Amino acid sequence: MIEELRPVAGELVLEKHFYSGFQGTELDTLLRVKGCDTVYLVGLDADICVRHTAADAFYRGGYGIVVVRDAVAARIDGNWEEYFRRVYGGARIVESSELVPEEHLERA
């Protein structure tokens, strides 16, 4: 893991074993306990793991979906952005520069 992505003390880490971050983890429960209504998705691949996580977020609880364009890669589907918007209730696609700076976020 690169240093910039290492969790800091007290941050929760869930290990995933399936395409979706929800499958076989406590992610849904943890998000609900914290009152989260939106998931921000990053990672590999936008057209596989990120897509499956988005599907579970959408169908499990109607979470809002935001995909960070410059923090995902897609090797199969060149139209992944349109797919996300059309299928997952108008998912938002943003650049990381559009996100709130870390110092303004409350750490979980």
Image: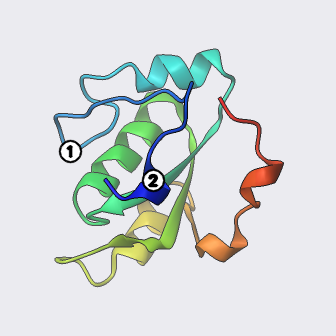
> In the image, what residue occupies the spot 62% across and 15% down?
33
**Going 17% across and 77% down the picture, which residue do you hit?**
76
Label 1 is placed on what type of residue? Tyr
Per the image, label 1 sits on a secondary structure element best described as: loop
List the residue tagged with mark 2.
5
Name the outermost residue toward the right. Answer: 104
Residue 1 position in % (x across, y down): 31, 53
Q: Could you say where residue 40 lies in the image, as x and y percent from the top left?
A: 54, 52
* 20 left or right of 92 in image: left
Q: Which is more N-terminal, label 2 or label 1?
A: 2
Residue 78, quarter of the rendered image: bottom left
> What residue is pinned by disc 1?
19
Above or below residue 64? Residue 66 is below
Where residue 91 appears, as percent x and y from the top left, is: 55, 60
* Three-letter code, disc 2: Leu
> Alpha-carbon distance for marks 1 and 2?
20 Å
Q: In the structure shown, which secondary structural element does the residue marked by tag 2 occupy?
A: helix
